[in-house]
């Protein structure tokens, strides 16, 4: 692997701390031939909107687009599970030639009659943009006939990067926000943006706020409901967990409804505590909320500290590579790994900004590789060259880790246990310990 060199077009998207002045390029389209780990615009919109559990999600395009993103988040619901079904208009050669609007109309009306959703999201894919179907017109017609919001999501894959999909999803959510009754919402209230309840995290976080005396109006979009999204404009504060996907919506709501926002993370002890303290500080005219928050953090940390200390004793000195969707998650992971005594030898993301990578540079040790929009060959090289003991990423990074004979932890879409909050930190530490400690990696390294 040491003879590998990156594509010339990608040289400024890779930086090793301590080697040269920092000058990273990001927010660009993936280089041709790079086999980017990024998803397309359509997938970006789908992962954001998918957890809205009582809405109909219809993919207008070939069946492959729906199959690719079926159950993509695995997001848990405390009630309806309409989002778990994968609906597609299944466009074929005839529709590509003569247009697919008739099929879209029939699909929408049939599905709405059968499932009675609170709203419907219609995702436009690449082929729809190419053939010119007027998705907005069909949605408007069906909405008038059926009496529910039918929202076009303009997420044609060729339009840009995954970030553009996030923006399309935020625009779709924005059409719902502001249409509900907010008369019952109090002043001490928040929306949680960018939390997707993959392993039940939303329930853990909402419970913290309940103990603090803070009402959660809406979670966008984990275990979400259309009616709650409609009245999200009644909250006093937006708390943004996944900055890459939801900062655009937070800024939109600040401009339109005057709702301020803060960026937080619920991964790791340090960041979870800081998130709760920052929310409590926002409601400074209620000092009792801060007192409840201090008591909550003290109690939670006291419970988990002995087990974290046990895992740290073994993991100290181990080396981890991180490659995730948004850079803000990477910040928290670096801190969480540091609390376990581990060092980070690679940190990268699919959608980070220049400011994000500046922060990563300051957080990382000399020799750490920082990478934007990586490909499997680059990830493989640095995992081997930097002698990683663990790779933390998503479903597409798992094969890279296993082929290199390195332990892997899923911190993205497919995990089944919550990794957020204080409870989640214990789950994370336990998974890291069990993975790194497994004897199979030593056997594979001997074979290699």
Image: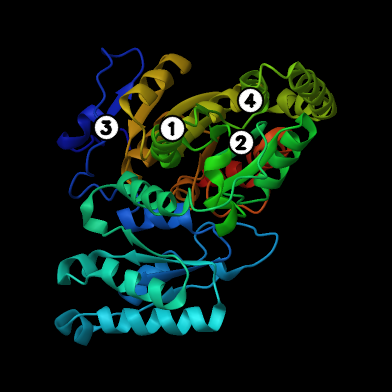
Mark positioned earlier in the residue sequence (1 or 2): 2
| Disc on the earlier residue, 3 or 1 | 3
Q: Residues within 10 Å of mark 1 (few under 14, many from 20)?
A: some
Find numbered disc 2 in the image and state the secondary structure of the residue it sits on: strand
User: Which callout, 1 or 4, points to the residue nearer the camera?
Assistant: 1
Given contact means CB atoms under 8 Å apart, are the residues at marks 3 and 2 in contact? no
Q: Are marks 4 and 2 in contact (CB under 8 Å)?
A: yes
- Mark 2 = which residue? 190
CA gap, disc 4 to disc 2?
Answer: 9 Å
Q: CA gap, disc 3 to disc 2?
A: 32 Å
Which residue position is annotated with label 4?
A: 279
| Label 1 – label 2 distance at C-alpha | 13 Å
Measured as percent of width and height from the top left, residue 134 is found at 22, 70
> Toward which corner of the image does residue 446 lie, by quadrant?
top right
Considering only order in the chain, which callout, 2 or 4, is on the residue closer to the N terminus?
2
> Which image quadrant is residue 290 in?
top right
For this orientation, the residue located farthest to the bottom is: 94
Tell me if label 3 and label 4 are in contact, CB under 8 Å: no
Residue at x 41%, y 78% (from the top left corner)? 145
Find residue 254 and name its label. Answer: 1
Check whether the beta carbons of the residues at disc 3 and disc 1 lie within 8 A of each other. no
* Front residue of this view, candidates 317 and 339: 339
Choose between 173 and 345: the one closer to the eye: 173
> For the residues carrying marks 4 and 2, which lies nearer the camera in this image?
2
Q: Earlier in the sequence, mark 3 or mark 2?
A: 3
Q: Secondary structure at mark 3?
A: loop
Between discs 1 and 4, the one toward the N terminus = 1
Above or below, 146 relative to 283 = below
Q: Is residue 316 visible?
A: no
Seen in the picture, residue 366 relative to 229 is either above or below; the reply is above
């Amino acid at each position: 692997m040491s003879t590998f060199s990156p594509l010339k077009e990608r040289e400024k998207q890779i930086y090793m701390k301590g080697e040269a002045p920092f000058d990273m390029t990001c927010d660009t389209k993936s280089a041709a031939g790079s086999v980017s780990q990024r998803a397309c615009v359509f997938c970006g919109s789908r992962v954001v909107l998918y957890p809205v559990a009582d809405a109909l999600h219809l993919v207008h395009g070939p069946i492959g687009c729906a199959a690719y993103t079926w159950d993509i988040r695995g997001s848990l619901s405390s009630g309806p599970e309409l989002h778990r079904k994968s609906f597609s208009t299944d466009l074929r050669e005839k529709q590509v030639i003569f247009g697919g609007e008739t099929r879209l109309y029939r699909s929408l009306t049939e599905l709405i009659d059968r499932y009675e959703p609170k709203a419907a999201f219609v995702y436009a894919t690449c082929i729809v943009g190419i053939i010119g179907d007027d998705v907005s017109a069909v949605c408007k017609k069906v909405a008038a006939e059926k009496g529910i919001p039918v929202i076009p999501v303009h997420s044609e894959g060729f339009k840009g990067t995954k970030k553009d999909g996030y923006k399309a999803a935020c625009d779709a959510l924005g059409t719902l926000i502001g249409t509900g009754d907010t008369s019952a919402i109090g002043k001490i209230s928040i929306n949680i943006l960018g939390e997707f309840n993959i392993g039940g995290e939303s329930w853990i976080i909402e419970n913290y706020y309940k103990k603090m005396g803070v009402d959660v109006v809406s979670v966008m979009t984990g275990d979400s409901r259309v009616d709650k999204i409609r009245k999200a404009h009644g909250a006093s504060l937006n708390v943004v967990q996944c900055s890459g996907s939801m900062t655009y919506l937070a800024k939109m709501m600040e401009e339109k409804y005057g709702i301020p926002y803060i960026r937080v993370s619920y991964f790791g002890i340090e960041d979870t505590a800081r998130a709760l303290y920052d929310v409590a500080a926002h409601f400074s005219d209620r000092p009792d909320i801060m007192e409840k928050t201090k008591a909550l953090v003290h109690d939670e940390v006291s419970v988990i500290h002995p087990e974290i200390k046990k895992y740290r004793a073994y993991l100290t000195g181990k080396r981890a590579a991180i490659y995730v969707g948004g850079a803000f998650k990477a910040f928290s992971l670096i801190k969480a790994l540091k609390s376990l005594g581990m060092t980070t030898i690679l940190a990268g993301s699919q959608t980070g900004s220049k400011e994000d990578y500046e922060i990563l540079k300051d957080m990382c040790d000399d020799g750490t590789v920082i990478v934007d929009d990586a490909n499997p060959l680059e990830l493989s090289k640095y995992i081997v060259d930097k002698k990683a003991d663990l790779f933390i990423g998503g479903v597409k990074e798992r094969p890279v880790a296993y082929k290199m004979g390195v332990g892997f932890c899923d911190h993205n879409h497919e995990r089944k246990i919550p990794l957020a909050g204080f409870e989640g930190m214990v789950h994370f530490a336990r998974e890291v310990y069990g993975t790194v400690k497994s004897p199979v990696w030593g056997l594979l390294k001997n074979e290699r």
